[in-house]
Amino acid sequence: MTEEKKDVEQALAQSLKELVQKMPFEKITIKKITDGAGVIRVTFYNHFQDKYDLLAYIVQKEILEPVGILLGNNMYKEALTLIFTNLKKDSAFYEKAVRIEGQNSFEEITEECIYKLLLELFSTRSSGKPHTKHPWLTIDSLARYYARSMNYVVIYWIKSGMTVSPEEVANIYEYVVTRSLWDVLEEL
């Protein structure tokens, strides 16, 4: 990606983030986004399909991409902590964005972004062979399961005002996913 393209995408992302904090998402137009970024409308469409695509870009670039190196080095808890830390850093934006509902809701967008990240992670770690005991247990189904689980925690945490620290949320999530349902029930 050229530096100029990256700069334009970042300007558009920043413009959307500022607008989301001032008005409901459904009232934000491409023109308002491009005016805030100092570019023309055609430029927007050279980079994104619509404002939902731009929102997915923000989640991808600012929340998920930074954890790639940590995941590559098996630093899962640190990756989780970084995700929650980055969400909290921009809490004013995410507390408004989480209210985007309906088709292309914030929840749908974030779940799809998390799914793609996990699918890539699982694919690089997998032998490629089907699970011998449970053939329906595929990389895709596991990525979807964990994406939904992680997304639930993200959405719940944002909606509850991010009062629990990023480190504590990461600890809680790690606790839940490293135990069976039966273990958790026993510990209640």
Image (spheres, helix red, strand yellow):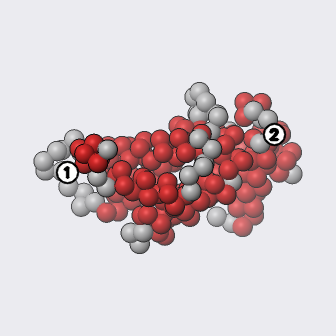
Residue beneath disc 2: 22
Q: Is residue 182 visible?
A: yes
Question: Outermost residue, left direction?
Answer: 133
- What secondary structure is marked by label 1? loop
For the point 38% across and 43% down, which residue is it?
144
Mark found first going from the N terminus, 1 or 2: 2
Question: Outermost residue, front direction?
Answer: 188
Please tell me the numbered disc located at residue 130: 1
Q: Is 59 situated above or below 155?
A: below
Amino acid type, label 2: Lys
For the point 82% across and 45% down, which residue is it?
34
Please provide percent x and percent y for residue 7.
75, 61
Residue 188, quarter of picture: top left
Q: Is 157 situated above or below 105?
A: below
For the point 59% across and 41% down, which residue is it?
160
Query: Residue 24 vs residue 110: left or right?
Result: right
The image quadrant where one finds the N terminus is: bottom right
Please tell me the numbered disc located at residue 184: none
Amino acid type, label 1: Pro
Q: Nearer the viewer, residue 24 or 167?
A: 167
